[in-house]
Image (tube, rainbow, N blue to C red):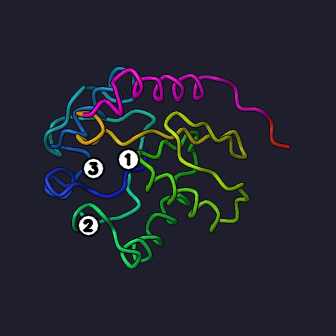
Amino acid sequence: LIGLAPAAQGGNRTGRMFTGDRSGDWLFEALHRFGFANQPHSETVDDGLILKDCYITATIRCAPPQNKPLPEETAACRPYFLRELDLLKRIGIFIPLGQVAFTQLLKNLRLKGLTLPPLKFGHGQVVPLPKGRTIIASYHPSQQNTFTGKLTREMFYRVFKQAQQHLNSPVPPEK
């Protein structure tokens, strides 16, 4: 799972992405529902949350002012994100949460040598990648999106259902 950055009152405060904020309420409930977390909530880093076959990161490492990272911040954090991609050998699914995370993921995959056509963000969009990997894009579970109905629980659940189905299907042989 790829977010934009730690929320000022969430991950930046607690030390774990999506922990202690409303976006996390949605995220951890969905992760639990589909078997990717042992509990449906996370309030502190020592609350007992255990993720299963799931890793949460962000393209930006610090909470940006007004939640809008500057190009300099994105560039400064890029080496860390690229290194995570190198270290995480078993990635089957990338779920970028929001358009910025989607755009940054594509940019970083291209920097790693992956050839991708121009792609526009769309909730639920599925992008097949080499080695049986897949991107499934989602709106970010921000209050702005959830309070307005731009993202409903059913829409969010569909993303995780797709991820679950993909992870449970056999990986096609490489060409």
Residue type at tag 3: Met
State yes or no: discs 3 and 1 in contact (Cβ < 8 Å). Answer: yes
Q: Residue furthest front?
A: 148
The mark closer to the camera, 1 or 2, is: 2
Q: Earlier in the sequence, mark 3 or mark 2?
A: 3
Alpha carbon of mark 3 to alpha carbon of mark 2: how far? 14 Å
Q: Identify the disc placed on residue 23.
A: none
Residue type at tag 2: Pro
Reply above or below: 135 against 25.
Answer: below
x, y percentage for residue 72? 39, 79
Alpha carbon of mark 1 to alpha carbon of mark 2: how far? 18 Å
Residue type at tag 1: Ile
Reply above or below: 56 against 31.
Answer: below
Residue at 31% over, 64% down: 68
Viewer-side residue, 100 vs 51: 100
User: Where does the magenta region start and end?
Assistant: 148-172
Q: Is residue 119 toward the left or the right of residue 10 in the image?
A: right
Alpha carbon of mark 3 to alpha carbon of mark 1: how far? 7 Å
Q: Which residue is mark 1?
A: 56
Residue at 57% over, 37% down: 125
Q: Which residue is mark 3?
A: 17
x, y percentage for residue 28? 28, 32
Q: Earlier in the sequence, mark 1 or mark 2?
A: 1
Q: Is residue 94 toward the left or the right of residue 131 in the image?
A: left
| Secondary element at image label 1 | loop
Q: Identify the disc placed on residue 64.
A: 2
- Is residue 164 covered in magenta? yes
